[in-house]
Image (cartoon, helix red, strand yellow):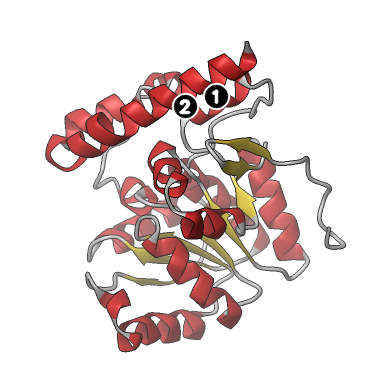
């Protein structure tokens, strides 16, 4: 453990993914302590879809496991941990962390950067975050074109713009695993910066994608709201891939408990 950082409990393994048993507040406090100590890091929020991808790919499992903070963005993971008697305290989502970490950054005077989302969405998210987090400084944003990661020139352009801005927190909303592979390559260039793989969180913050009501988030039914909102994009992911995976995960966890 690095001096200046609080002690941390052992990780809990669910669906083959080691998860930190942090609340959202504890996650924010950990990142704040690291920033105070001048240290950067990588934060990942695995959901069922990410765990499914990781289950069949050792390289992706290593990518997630190597992150400095890994918190569960998915109620099935929380439920499975409880069945295994290694309870995770709560679901911690990227869509919530973009707000709580931005509020923390505003208090600490640490600039943030938004990387990802369609053109114009990041600018709207920056406006909303600055309005909701008094004193927040968004030092830059970037919406790289589809396929930018397929060339060294495309990645270099993203890297150069980011390094020039010198943020202390970067929200990377490019989807897993692209965002986290990109983060792994960017970290050596900004060792004092925290990178948060946040999926659709920038779009949520901008209001361009609606979030489910609070009761659906708390009961693990947010996916139904998103499916109803974007059936064409999400039907196969949820109904064909994620629901069967979650069902198998919970069944195995129940059998292990018994």
Nearest the eye: 83 or 46:
83
- Quadrant of the frame with the C terminus: top right
What is the crowding at mark 2: few (fewer than 14 residues within 10 Å), some, or many (at least 20)? some
Say which residue label 2 marks. 249
For the point 34% across and 49% down, the residue is 200
**Quadrant in which residue 228 is drawn:** top left
**Quadrant in which residue 202 is drawn:** bottom left
Q: Is residue 57 above or below residue 85?
A: below
**Quadrant in which residue 38 is drawn:** bottom right
Where does residue 49 sit, x and y in percent of width and height? 38, 41
In this rendering, does residue 35 appear at all?
A: yes
Q: Secondary structure at mark 2?
A: helix
Residue 201 horizontal side relative to residue 167, left or right = left
C-beta proximity under 8 Å, tags 1 and 2? yes
Q: Is residue 30 above or below residue 239?
A: below
For marks 1 and 2, the one nearer the N-term is 1
Where does residue 214 sit, x and y in percent of width and height? 41, 24
Nearest the eye: 125 or 60:
60
For the point 70% across and 41% down, the residue is 11
Residue 80, disc: 1
What is the crowding at mark 1: few (fewer than 14 residues within 10 Å), some, or many (at least 20)? many
Where does residue 146 sit, x and y in percent of width and height? 22, 69
Residue 135 horizontal side relative to residue 249, left or right = right
Q: Is residue 75 above or below residue 190?
A: above
Where does residue 76 sit, x and y in percent of width and height? 47, 26
Nearest the eye: 21 or 244:
244
For the point 47% across and 18% down, the residue is 251
């Amino acid at each position: 453990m690095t001096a200046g950082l609080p002690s941390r409990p052992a990780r809990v393994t669910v669906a083959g993914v080691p998860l930190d048993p942090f609340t959202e507040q504890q996650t924010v406090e950990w990142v704040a302590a690291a920033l105070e100590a001048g240290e950067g890091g990588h934060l990942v929020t695995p959901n069922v879809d990410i765990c499914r991808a990781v289950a069949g790919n050792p390289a992706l499992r290593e990518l997630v496991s190597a992150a400095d903070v890994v918190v569960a963005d998915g109620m099935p993971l929380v439920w499975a941990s409880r069945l295994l008697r290694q309870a995770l305290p709560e679901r911690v989502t990227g869509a919530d962390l973009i707000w709580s970490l931005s509020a923390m950054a505003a208090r600490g005077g640490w600039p943030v950067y938004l990387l990802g989302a369609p053109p114009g969405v990041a600018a709207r998210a920056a406006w909303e975050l600055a309005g909701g987090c008094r004193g927040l400084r968004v030092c830059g944003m970037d919406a790289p074109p589809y396929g930018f990661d397929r060339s060294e020139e495309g990645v270099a352009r993203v890297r150069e713009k980011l390094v020039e801005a010198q943020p202390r927190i970067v929200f990377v909303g490019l989807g897993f695993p692209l965002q986290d592979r990109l983060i792994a390559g960017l970290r050596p260039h900004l060792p004092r910066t925290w990178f948060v793989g946040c999926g659709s969180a920038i779009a949520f913050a901008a209001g361009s994608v609606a979030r489910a009501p609070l009761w659906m988030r708390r009961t693990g039914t947010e996916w139904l709201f998103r499916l109803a909102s974007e059936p064409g994009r999400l039907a196969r992911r949820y109904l064909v891939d994620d629901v069967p995976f979650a069902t198998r995960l919970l069944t195995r966890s129940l059998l292990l408990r018994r």
